[in-house]
Image (spheres, rainbow, N blue to C red):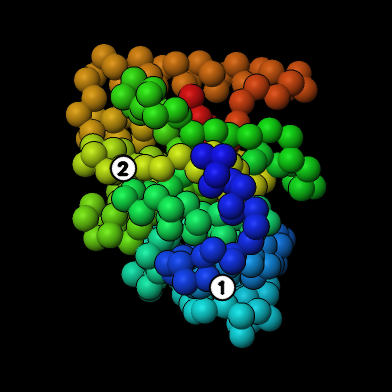
Amino acid sequence: MLDLLQSSEQGTSGCLKGKKITIITVVYNGAKYLEQAIESVLGQDYPNMEYLVIDGGSTDGSVEIIRKYAAQITSWASEPDEGIYDAMNKGIRMASGDLIGVLNSDDLLHENVISKIAHAADQYPGYDYYYGSVSRMRENGEVYSEAKPVAEEELDERKYKQIPYPHGGLYMRKKVFEKIGLYNLDYTINSDYDLILRMLERNMKGFPLGFAVSRYRDGGVSGGYATFLERLKLLENHGVSRVQRSFTVATSITKLFLSGLLNRAGISYRRREPVRREGGAETERLHG
């Protein structure tokens, strides 16, 4: 892992002929931070990169921001969709890269991180996906903690208790989607969790990058208990016993309740990852 990090810090010199990497940004009425997200992608030093922006028919100036960068964006579209996962699926269908990752419209890529991912894929080609951590930042951009993936040796025990990898730190080969399908639109909050479980259940191999890939921004409206009702459905569909899924969700609800008490007291208790935006509002997954 140390060799990977040291080599990737030297820039793209060893990856100029590396695989094409597709980055997809999905947005709906996200003008407040969209330009920062776009610039974090366009500022990457990796040359073989495809950038797709999928807008859900925004009315807040997001489309004007996209047009401002249209000459540097590989392709973009703006039309109504069925939510964030539908927009991601549209981007995946358009993608021509060997590796595909998603950056939400209010999040940021770390500087020159795509070169590091490309180097990992070149040095360790026998993997289906590559995953890292994501940095958590306040609305003002200040980074204050890190959401880390579940360790490989703990996956079997924990994969049905929490999402194993932060979505913003995950880059998958396009063949993954060809084998297991796209994001399942039956889930409006947990479809990224479902996709990861399908990869694991098919015994697909993931490579731990060992560094933070992106930064995601706190803020927005929690999905609250609707998240856990859908989580019950997801766990049932993945064959988890009634007792286990009830215990897992009950534990998560307890943590949600405690986090509410602590947040009202001004204490940060847990991390959240934004996963859905509709009508200008934001829904987040509460990990537990």
Residue 138 lies, in percent from the top left, at 74, 41
Instruction: Residue at 67% x, 62% y: name it.
Output: 40
Q: Earlier in the sequence, mark 2 or mark 1?
A: 1
Residue 131 lies, in percent from the top left, at 46, 44
Residue 194, above or below 254: below
Side of 84 relative to 31 (left or right): left
Disc 2/disc 1 C-alpha distance (Å): 26 Å
Residue 183, above or below 81: above
User: Would residue 13 be seen by someone viewing this image from the given angle?
Assistant: yes
- Name the residue beneath numbered marker 2: 205
Instruction: Residue at 45% x, 29% y: name it.
Output: 150
- Name the residue beneath numbered marker 1: 47
Instruction: Residue at 65% x, 57% y: name it.
Output: 10
Mark linked to residue 16: none
Task: Report the front residue among 118 and 261.
Answer: 118
Task: Report the front residue among 110 and 139.
Answer: 110
Kind of residue at disc 2: Lys
